[in-house]
Amino acid sequence: MGLSLNANAVKVHINSGNPAYPFPQFLKYACGGNLGTKLPEGLSHAEMELQIREAYQLHANAFEYTGDEWAGIKYIKGNNGCPYDCTEGDGYALLAAAYMADKTTFDGLWMRIHDLRRNRTKKYSDCKPTGESYEYGPFSLGDNGGDFDSAADGDEDVALALYVAYKQWGEFMLDENGEKVLDACGEPISYKKELIEVVRGLVALSTRFAAEKGDLRVNSGMIGLDGYVKGGNTWCEVTKWASENPTVFSDSMTVYNMSAGGTVNVEGISLIPEFGGSNQHHIDYNAPAYYREFHDLLLSLSKELGVTNEWEAEQFRRAEASSDWLIGQLIAKNPYSVPTAGWCTVNNDGSETTFDNFNVGEDFRTPWRNISNYVWHGNPKYSWNPATHKVEEGKNGFEYDAAVRLSNYMNDPMNWNDSLENSCYRYGEPSIPISGPKTMSWIIDPMTGVALDQRYTSFSIAMQKGAASFAAIGAQDYNLMGELYNNVYSIYDVKGTTDDGERIPVYMQGWFRQLGLMALTGNYAAPSQMEASSNLKIYRSIKDSVSSCRVGDTITYILSYRNYGSKDATDVVIVDTLPNDFQLVSVSDSGVYSPVTNEIWWSLGDVPGFKSDSTEGAVLDFSAPNLSKTMGEVYYKCVVKPGASGRYSLNATIYSKDGKESKTDEYPNYVTSTMQRNTIDIIPNTLSVSKTADRDTVKKDDVVEFTIAYSNTDSLPFLTGGRSRVNFTVAGNYENKELQLKLRLNNDAIEPFINAGNYRVTHYVKSTKEEDDEFLFITDMVQGLSNSIGLSTVDLSDSVVGCRIQLPSYLSSNTIFLSWYPSLSIIGEIGDLKGGSPIRLLGSIHTSRFTDFYDSESWSKLETAKNDELFYPVSPSYQIPDSIVDVDKVIYSACDNSDVVTETVLVEEFDGHTWRKILGEAPYNGIEAEDVLITDSIPLGFEFVSFVGDSTGATYEATPDADFSSGIVRYRADKLKIGEKGSFGYKCRYTGPVSGGSYVTSAIMESKNEKVKSTMHLIVDDLSSVKQTVNEGGDAPVDVYNVQGQLLKRQVSPDRALEGLSKGVYMVGNKKKVVTK
């Protein structure tokens, strides 16, 4: 591929000119939610915003400054790549700038479009006329310049973009000082005036003729007198109906007289189309979503526009209804028909319709402007009558049905109908048959769903997926929305670079990539809904990305907020509710805590709306003066109380006086390739310690033997939850004193790229190696990764060792994409792919002495496979929190199931704080304890005699000056393995009081991560073997303990303290009592 260079590329100015509707917004559509309102797994608003900004700049890399300039505004050509200087490409560019609130770029684009294309007007730059003798409409845009005819698809987009601009920046184009920009004629440049005229140009009636015998041939713009959309203002009408059924106005009605000038009243005259039908029509030109907007706009401006407005508005209503009806006809053809046609025909009464393909550059657009009508407006309450060519009352769901049909198709295009059974698309080497939206071809037979050219399947670029995104939104298929987002973001074709090395997309691909990303995230609103308002969002994060903790740990929750709207949010309040198992420590920013409801309230006053900063390019500068005012954060600290267990997920809400409330979601608002959630898992204690004595009571000079038993559990529940749709396949065998391991990471996640360094794979062997020998890992081959493969071992017992392979930190895109474009992705000619090729690792584990270390009874069992095979899926999956799912596919999108799965290796994922089990199983689970210390204080009144038995690691230190102990026994260990347990003992002589009282003595065990305690009582007395009754001094209630210090009864009457207790010694209040019967 030869690369071209753009030396006059445009740097974008997102959110310039103080827009009313800044980017982004992340709001719902009339049809429901989207990825911006219900986040997909691991994809945050921060990432969406950054990626869409970058997508817009990539699109704009194809724009170029022309060298022309007026009033300080540089003219911009936005349609580079179009075979000629087409309005179509200008429409894409203009929409891109308007929706990104980029006034600087929009104005430069529009100034050029106006001066080049606006027939019968005067140029802004020199007040000279453009196309002054043009006769086919009073407000037309010349496709390829002045005096040329119009193209419906381009004109519609330009008109919509002007509507968005009008809603963004108001009636007039203003300069940086807020002054009106004047053209060379001295007139202020008006978005509103241009909007009205370009919109009317789509439907305005005009004539080049005089009436003959009561008939007048007229031009009706882009919408025929028959109510169907035409391909352009000089295209023939779709049907013959209007030629056979002339339009007659019974009241005064004027049309533009293009030859003589002025207007002519056509009341009572039969109007017939100058360009009668019938004719094929490009159904992808139909834009019912736009027509609904234009209809309502014209009605809202009726006082300004005069008597022709009702007819022109109704033409848009007819075009909307007829376009919806045509989509309904397409879908009704058969169960397999899909809205991917480029051509359509319809006869006079609608009894016959046909739908066929045109070419790869047009057909894919059909879902965009059609299904978006349902996305923006819901199902209409009126429908098209093809026999009368009128709009009638009555609901229809044509566009919704098309959305559902196309969504179902995209989920499994390879098996859409009977003729396609088991025809999954095969990719990669070795080949994997797959289906799903990635396999949706660029050109598809609308009657069967069959891909007409498989070349366009393997080249699954952003254009077609971006246009089809509206179907997923309309059908509310969030999984499909997520897959499309990844596809649209990742794959596009590059034709060259700018002067500073930035990539330039091939024509159309920049826009449809940007369009898909905006639409899928709730940033492609209907212009009528783009009103200035506040728009608060709130996000939760946890300091240091903590995702697990223990009882007693302190957690800091951070609540950040941002006003995405242009108006101030007033009387802003944040409310968060603390779980009962958490104890509040402190609150920032004068937050108020209610112990009754466990709620924390912050009253923040007003949060400013967005005002423009002087920023350039895609980078988002949060320190910019005005943007920084729209955001802030509060936080609070809490301690995990005893009794806390399981997983905790909190929800905070932000409110304002005039705005909608917003709640925190599952993910922190970070830009990261690490799968993070806002949940906290409470880790139960893994260490345990017990202190016991060989007697319950002591007398002076008695020798007491104490035993300290300790252990590190091997049955700790795994922390689970990670990124779904990431599969591992493994294989291997042991031979020649080497454990050969083979693995693949098969990424089909929603997020465009993941970090391979967040994964590790553990194989468990029953090892016979010598203690002074060590394991080593040798890399035989690595693909899609750096060579920095790490090996560590974890000892589960004296003979079971976990050999843990840590993948290196390395960004990696979807495995299927990397398999399609391994070399092109490396040199940057295809899309935004990371990693270069699919991840595959071949290596071997051996001891440093090459000894025979492997026992055939090892827990992990691997099937053998050749190096170039797919290997076997690791199952089950714990990636979705609180779910266990069997995995039997090599990759998520695969059609075929694997006959063999592997359940005896463990795959873990790092979440930024903790490793979590996501795939497979392990023989044991626990945490190897480090820096273990057991401390046992010997109470005053006892003197240390000696250790008992094996006391390795234990020491005694006398503490003669201490107030509460005579000495300290300590046990130290650098590590305590998973499942390891032990004990040690020592003897003491009691030298204290002869009788009365008791001793409470404790052993404390701690490591790097936790601390546990064991307490026991020793009673001092020469009690007889009868039930003692001691006057406790009145009837004050008492607590009852056993000799281990366990509380048995709380605050009971002394005379009932021993009821129901078995034989033994007890502490009742501060007295000891014995039950002998």
Image: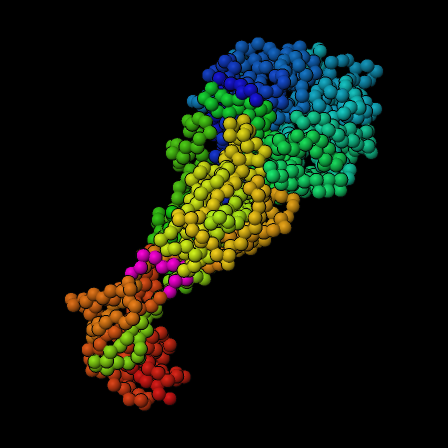
Nearer to the camera, 758 or 541: 758
Residue at point 44% right, 26% down? Answer: 616
Q: Position of residue 47 (x, y in %)?
A: 48, 38
- Is residue 96 at all visible to an observer of this figure? no
Nearer to the camera, 493 or 687: 687
Residue at point 53% right, 12% down? Answer: 125
The residue stretch that appears in magenta: 972-981
In the picture, measured across the screen, residue 911 lies left or right of residue 116, that is: left
- Toward the left, the furthest residue is 961
State yes or no: residue 168 in magenta. no
Q: In the rendered image, which quarter contains the C terminus?
A: bottom left
Residue 707 against residue 252 in the figure, above or below: below
In the picture, measured across the screen, residue 922 lies left or right of residue 352, that is: left
Residue at point 35% right, 83% down? Answer: 1064
Nearer to the camera, 52 or 291: 52
State yes or no: residue 978 in magenta. yes
Residue 541 against residue 198 in the figure, above or below: below
Most prominent secondary structure in the magenta stretch?
strand
